Image: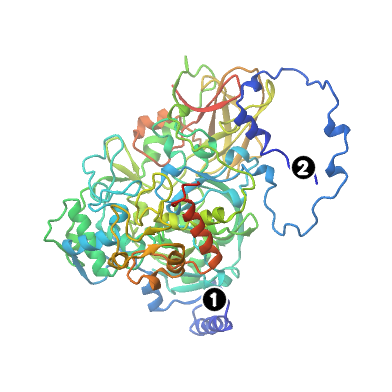
Amino acid sequence: MSEKRPNGTSRRAFLRGGVAAAGAVAAGPMRAETPDPLITEVQDWASGLGVGVDEVPYGLPIEFEADVRRRNVPWLTADTKSSVNFTPIHALDGTITPQGCGFERHHSGAITLHKDDYRLMVHGLVERPLVFTYADLERFPRENHVYFCECAANSGMEWAGAQLNGAQYTHGMIHNMEYTGVPLRALLNEAGISGDLSDKWIYVEGADAASNGRSIPLAKALDDVLVAFKANGEALRREHGYPVRLVVPGWEGNLWIKWLRRIEVTNAPVESREETSKYTDTLADGTARKWTWVMDAKSVITAPSPQMPIQHGTGPLVITGMAWSGHGRITRVDVSKDGGKTWEIARLDRAGEAKALCRFYLDTTWDGGEMLLQSRAMDETGYVQPTKNQLRAVRGENSVYHNNGIQTWHVATSGEVENVEVT
Amino acid sequence: MSKSPEVGLLQVLWLGLALAAGGASADTLGLGRPALAEEIAAWDLDVRPDGTGLPPGSGDVLTGEGVFAEKCAACHGDFGEGVGNWPEVAGGQGTLDNKDPVKTVGSYWPYLSTLWDYVHRSMPYGAAQTLSPDDVYAVAAYILYSNDIVDEEFSLNATNFTGITMPNADGFVVDDRAAREYDVWRAAPCMAECKDSVTITMRATALDVTPRDDVATAAPVDLIAKGQRLFSTCKSCHEIGEGAKNRSGPMLTGIVGRAAGAVDGFRYSKALKTAAGGGLIWNETALDAFLTQPRDYLNGSKMVFAGITNPEDRKAVIAYLKSHSAQGDTR
């Protein structure tokens, strides 16, 4: 085969070598002075043989895409087993997040739990407390739905101002997958629930040491919550709760219990650690909001962004990003190139789906000047994504969770991009 | 882990019983089997603010101090002040409206039940569900004491539990975004002349806290690299390399060839101190034996680790430790 290509992709070489050259790329049609040997010479791959079937029984991305991977921020937490990493959203397109690069958040590490050892208990205020095996779950009628899962702390480091220089870090605690599972209402029905359900709750917990128990109003449980065992067509990955996780559409990721083992119907919330000391939002006066489950409408431009500088010079430029809302469908996304003075309506690649990522594009022309790129999402309830300053005016600067403020990227004339805050 | 035929048979039997007992009504599928009372009791451990779910038992501040020092202080500090990035559990009262509020059990947690429940089910980190109810009562009493909520004579039990009111019990409001925010955000969005001017007020590169991208393509698979990967399990408790500090385990820089129990400032177990007194040196043979089954090799060691069964893996880990030892730091 051909010799190994020098280390890495052109983008990484570009970042390493500095970006000064990019701005010098002339506008207008490209012209070749000499014939391109990649065309005029017979390449190894056009003459010899590639790899056969069975070489890779289960495929990973080709080596040139090695930089498209989850990353963490080591200073953020004391230990990787109680930590988070980030989806490389800057490098992805479309809407579905491959499982292998979907962000991970563990409180006591991702446990290894065999399907045969899996048990799910439904008990509490039910007529028949039941235990299900994994095989039992596959005998219930099942459904497929695409939903985003966003950690409530996504963009949390940005509350006090621009901190992390990359969309992966500022907005990467999100993934969007197609889940296969059983509606939770089917399991609750199997156990038998009756009487006044309006003031009831469920308490859900995982099989790991953290257990990560959370209380959820029964109304939500009966509405659209799924007990999922597949994502994007294949078994859940260990880091996402193999073999079974809870899917709580539109609500904060902490409720999406991984390695789900217990569902208790209760008459009151448990007020567990994860719903009191954490995942509550401290306001300026020192009081805190609790039960802030819904993820409000939000969007971010994924390219150009700090990890995705403009390398092609002036001319046609695709600005792209993603938008989502826990309230329902995304109906519109606007893009500003001047820090919010003027806005244009972006093109939604497809009509938004409820509580799922929506891909948007602004097909535009770059004149080589500086830009302050922003995006602003709107959902079917009329909710318009606020600015960070609007959020701070209401909540102060001590919150961590639920920062859905508008993000600004500064594009320099060189094509380099930086995370900034603007007036 | 393998599926035994007995399990499948048992399921069929249970299903039969459930159906025979009328467990499946017309609109159910008759799937699953009845949960036994013992099974529910084993998993239904949560404790509510009104004390529901508390087992009998009691524990006082002094006992709690001892348990805390042994099981909790490595991460949370002797007085609950927190070590490094690990959570502080004491102090911070009166800081919630400050910039960077200090949220601890005393300053922030609204219910005592949350503390008891969490310690009981999820702590100590890496050894959850190993504390007895009495120990949990004691640790909770000590944490209350560390936050000046009870005096040092205090003993906590299931009866006086609900008499304790946490300082920040009234500090929470139910999500009011709909009332306070949504009507404002739902205004028609401005499209042109939305601002007179725009200036940059902050730049991420000025802070420079973004991790540098160190992705390497096809790293050589040598023994040290393999050991480094395996060492990720050890990193919960041990640091190694330049500037390594003691965590819940001692720092390991220079460990190969060093006398046991010799790291300054680390509180070793009695067992390890005794072995050190007997002249134990952490050479490769000793490390290999210890890492095979720590508790067997050194009965009474504080190290919460089952051991590495694969000899090749032990060799790799030791090679990695050695790379940070006497002959110089090669990484």
In front of the other: A183 or B159: B159
Q: Quadrant of residue B278?
A: bottom left
Q: Chain of mark 1?
A: B
C-alpha span from label 2 to label 1: 62 Å
Q: Is residue B227 left or right of residue B299?
A: right
- What quarter of the picture does the N terminus of chain B occupy? bottom right
Q: Residue at x 55, y 38 (%)?
A: B213
Three-letter amino acid code of the residue under disc 2? Glu
In front of the other: B275 or B8: B275
Q: Read off the residue under disc 1.
A: B30
Label 2 crowding class (10 Å Cα cut-off): few <14, some 14-19, many 20+? few
Q: Position of residue B123 (x, y in %)?
A: 34, 61
Q: Position of residue B200 (x, y in %)?
A: 46, 21
Q: Position of residue B65 (x, y in %)?
A: 20, 60
Q: Secondary structure at mark 2?
A: loop
Q: Is residue A73 left or right of residue A304?
A: left
Q: Read off the residue under disc 2.
A: A3
Q: Position of residue A148 (x, y in %)?
A: 55, 47
Residue B198 visible in the picture: yes
Residue A244 visible in the picture: no
